[in-house]
Image (cartoon, rainbow, N blue to C red):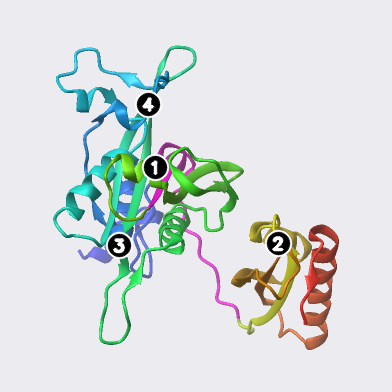
Amino acid sequence: YGFNNVALKPHNSASFLSGFPNPDPEVVRQKVADLLSGQGFSEILTNSLTNSHYFEKADAPDASLVRILNYNSQDLNIMRPTLLTSGLEVVRHNLNRRQRDLKLYEFGKIYHLGDNGKYKEKNVLAIYLTGNATAETWQHASQKAAYHDVAGAVQQVLAALGHPQPASQPTQHPYLAGGLALLAQNQPVANLGAVSPAVLKRLDVSQPVWYAELDWDWLLKKYKATLVARELHKFPEVRRDLSLVVDQAVTFDQLRTIAQRTEKKLLREVNVFDVYAGDRLEAGKKSYSVSFTLQDPTQTLTDQAIDQVMQKLIQQFEKQAGALIRK
């Protein structure tokens, strides 16, 4: 007798307490919901029907809208092509009741009519931020929600689903100002940015809103329920910083890719901690201050080895990105 005599499958037994990854869609969804709720977000559930007026331009109705033939209200005459507008209605409702600091998320379906005349639906995850991201306390003043707040929430979701370092590129999104697309495995998986003033005006929302929409179907499809364990490194890591002056068109993702391809053995992390564009630089130039974390799992790095790695990185930045090193 005794629990120690009960036969267990390998993935059910462990010498430590841990949740084993589960590929079930509802389990994955709850995992992400718990993650966002733990960051102070509240989940909302909105109507799949919405108003075509939000999307149609004057005298040019959108042919991709899925229209309801026997609608009871002009306000609910199409299936929503995005979660943005229904979420903004929630934001507006709360703003009108003096609830100005909002962090919301929603899982839901969006609908389109394809060029072939077939109806399409897709599951997405939407994230909304408006007002203050952090409340005022005796230690610090309140801070307005900004790009890095919504981007950080999206990146944590992607990391939890196995995509810890998504690439990014500017995108022309119809509802966002200064939109950015995040890519995993060269596939656009999220769009994020500030909701355009025209959209806010059309929905009568009185303050800026940050928004992100993630392709939940793709993320579920690519999710792998694996648990990876690595031994802690015995030798210390080393950080070195560079200040790189590049053209305005050069992105940090390009610099990170160059670094990762140049040094695959010792380079552990590449991060940007400052971006400057001003009078002290030539027109059309900007400066990235970038940190590099190096570590050898077999020995302590020497100054000579570190200098060799940094020289290789500098040469490739100069060659591939046209970078100048600020001394």
Q: Is residue 57 above or below residue 165?
A: above
Q: Is label 2 in contact with label 4 (beta carbons under 8 Å)?
A: no
Q: Nearer the viewer, mark 1 or mark 2?
A: 1
Which residue position holds label 4?
56
Mark 1: which amino acid?
Ala
Residue 172 location, x and y as percent? 54, 41
Q: Earlier in the sequence, mark 2 or mark 4?
A: 4
Q: Alpha-carbon neighbours of circle 1 within 10 Å: few (<14), some, or many (≥20)?
A: few
Residue 219, magenta (yes or no): yes
Stretch in magenta = 210-233
User: Which residue in the protein does label 1 denote?
Assistant: 198
SS for callout 1: helix
Q: Residue 48: image x %, image y %?
A: 25, 31
Q: Position of residue 58 (x, y in %)?
A: 39, 24
**Residue positioned 78% across, 82% down in the render:** 327
Q: Is residue 99 left or right of residue 7?
A: left
| Three-letter code, disc 3 | Gly
In whole angstroms, how far apart are the C-alphas of marks 1 and 4?
13 Å
Q: Is residue 277 magenta?
A: no
Q: Which residue is mark 2?
A: 255
